[in-house]
Amino acid sequence: MATENRNKSGRIRKIVLFCVFSLLFVVTVPLIPYAIDAYAVAGNKASVEKVAALEHPAINLWNDVRQRNGRTQGLTQVQGVDSGVLINKAGEDWRRFRIEQLVPYGAWFMGGIFGAIVVYYLLKGTQMMPGGSTGVRIPRTSLNQRTAHWFTAGVFWLLAVTGLILLYGRFVLIPILGPEGFAATASACKEMHNLFGPLFVLAVVAMFVLFIKGNMFNFGDLKWFAKGGGMFGGHVSAGKFNAGEKTWFWLVMIFGTALCVSGLILVVAALGFGRETLSLSHMVHGISAVLLIAVSFGHIYLGTIGVEGTLDSMTTGSVDAAWAKAHHDQWYAEMTNDSDAVEAADQEQDSGLVEGGVAKPEAGT
């Protein structure tokens, strides 16, 4: 009897074990492919690529052609820059950056700056000279400085307009001119941009030489920045050039130099740079141009309708004493050696500080 019970229990255990293993088999076997796939994704990528390469023998060759595994230099009988590279990934990266980031973000940035200036002008209007014009003129810029300024401005905006047409023309001008008309316009802009571009190099050098004096920052400029040039906290004392003008000068020098260097690399093919260097130069050129164009809107506004009397500095070479005293009081005091010149113009005329309607510094100033 006991033997029969043990045999019966043994059969029951076997049946139970069989059912358990069968259940585990049924549950786990379908999950094996998913486990293999997860393992491949987590840490067995190389094995998967190796299997793929075995199934598709040309895949490694195509990966090298597309530079997917890093830069690969091929062998060719044709000698030249990048002659051993069939497809350059840097060029594709630049194309995507230009279309997806530079074009839309650049438009928003330039448009935002321009729009902010328009709103500010509608709210504030032109900043007038306190007390009106005095008729007393103080020399501010030389003929060489004015010539360099307008030469730089002319070349810069010629290049800016032609460059913007090349960057945004397909979105704006094709609907107006049609494909053929835009093609002719873009071709002309490209030739003008390349032809007149080197002149901007001369312009930047001339501006640096003629305007570097007085444009070095000092600790007093921190107060100008803290008060936003007078928009927060009232009048800010300044020398011949305030901190805002100094900032504009150095932005022109820094981004202007970047434009010159990158532009020469792009134009002068004989320099022999590879496509990666050209792509980087194109990126630097585009970003620098957008930034400089956007900031120039503020410079133009303040130099024309934004502040009364400012434009005289670059047209006649002299400014009204009221303007000088209001915006550059330290420089005004140096030039007149009399802080009460505006209120006592007749006395200045008699003292010799003003001669022929133009204020002049005393000897030694």
Image: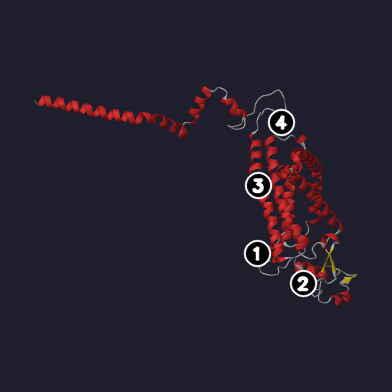
Please name the amino acid that badge 1 sits on.
Ala
CA–CA distance between discs 3 and 4?
32 Å
Please name the amino acid that badge 3 sits on.
Pro
CA–CA distance between discs 3 and 2?
42 Å
**Mark 1: which secondary structure?**
helix
Instruction: Identify the image quadrant of the N terminus.
Output: top left
Mark 3 or mark 4, which has the lower sequence index? 4
Q: Quick one: 245 or 33, which is closer to the camera?
A: 33
Mark 4 or mark 1, which has the lower sequence index? 4
Q: Quick one: 70 or 101, which is closer to the camera?
A: 101
Mark 2 or mark 4, which has the lower sequence index? 4
Asked if disc 4 and disc 1 are in contact, CB closer than 8 Å, the reply is no
Q: On residue 129, which mark appears?
A: none
CA–CA distance between discs 4 and 1?
51 Å
x then y, percent, for residue 93? 63, 38
CA–CA distance between discs 1 and 2?
23 Å
Question: Mark 2 highlights which residue?
Answer: 130
Question: Mark 1 highlights which residue?
Answer: 226
Residue at the image position 32 percent from the left and 28 percent from the top: 25
Question: Mark 3 highlights which residue?
Answer: 104
Q: Nearer the viewer, mark 3 or mark 4?
A: 3
Q: On residue 81, which mark appears?
A: 4
**Mark 4: which secondary structure?**
loop
Mark 3 or mark 2, which has the lower sequence index? 3
**Mark 2: which secondary structure?**
loop
Specify whether residue 361 is in view. Answer: no
Please name the amino acid that badge 4 sits on.
Val
